Image (spheres, rainbow, N blue to C red):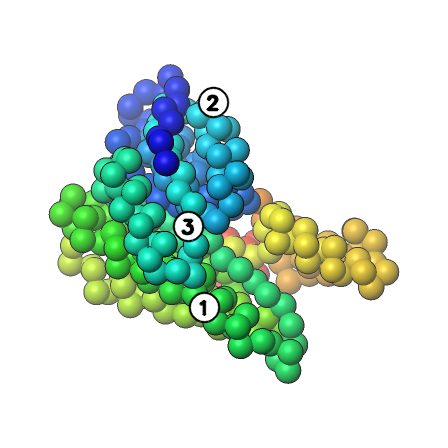
Amino acid sequence: MQAAETKNDETPEARPLAGRHALITGGNRGIGAAIAAELAGLGANLTLAARDEESLNQTREKLVRSGDVAVSVQAVDLTDPDSIAGAVDRAAADLGPVAVLVNNAGVAPSAPLAKVALDSWRETFEINVQAAFLLSQAVTGAMAEGGYGRIVNVASTAGLRGYPFVAAYVASKHALVGLTRALALELAKGPITVNAVCPGYTETEMALGAIANIRKSGKTEAEARAILTRGNPQGRLIQPEEVAAAVGWLCLPSSGAVTGQSIPVAGGEVM
């Protein structure tokens, strides 16, 4: 897709990622859109990748109005290796080699064990783990050649502990944390770091959907929110911007000694 230029009066000193190209999956909404805004504020040029091209363009338009960066969008099916490879090639053609990769896209189907369909299990792993693996594989060569690389996987507290009725999601996020640790060690001698952030329940469409499901049992919205946040010692939902701030820090040049970490952004839910 054609890249769009944006405008900003920030000084170069405040924009440590200026000129670097960041690719964000699921960058069209929720945590992904917040990460896009955070990295744009740090000066990165952006490729936003997701399945829904209309919402990608809407998010791009918001970024266009707020910063001096180039923004490109790529419609991609993260269950399809060929679609992923094509999106990476087009992104590099638009904005140059990818220096920052944020694997944010994910799905979280919910069902008791006996009702988990194999197709749902497979798709959850394809989007939550396989896509991150394929994208990392596709960009690390250029990162090494360019002398700079940051890979941040948006996992979940479900990658650090268990939850009932989301077996595929929990298993896939544990796998994503494992992939993070393995790649961090494999790439540690070079200029690439690999980390994960692990949000708790975050104020996104996914959490709002969970609240709506709880309300079907007759609960009020306040009661549903209390149920959803009872595992958080702060008693609240995490804000997307809080997750984005952690991702932005991990992408900075000054964070080069931090690799292989899975950082909870969860109000003390896991320690």
Rendered image: mark on residue 65: 2
Query: Going 63% across and 68% down the picture, which residue do you hit?
Result: 110
- Relative placement, left or right, of 153 versus 51 is left
Image quadrant assignment for residue 132: bottom left
Instruction: State how far apart marks 1 and 2 are (Cα).
Output: 36 Å
- Which amino acid, by three-letter code, is at mark 2? Arg
- Which amino acid, by three-letter code, is at mark 3? Val
Position above or below: 134 against 104? below
Q: Kindly identify which residue carries mark 3.
A: 76
Q: Nearer the viewer, mark 3 or mark 1?
A: 3
Kindly check if marks 1 and 2 are in contact, taking CB atoms under 8 A apart as contact: no
Q: Kindly identify which residue carries mark 1.
A: 125
Image spot of residue 222 (x, y percent): 79, 51
Q: Considering only order in the chain, which callout, 2 or 3, is on the residue closer to the N terminus?
A: 2
Query: Going 33% across and 34% down the picture, which residue do you hit?
Result: 44
**Outermost bottom residue:** 114
Image spot of residue 47 (x, y percent): 37, 39
Query: Going 31% across and 41% down the picture, which residue do you hit?
Result: 91
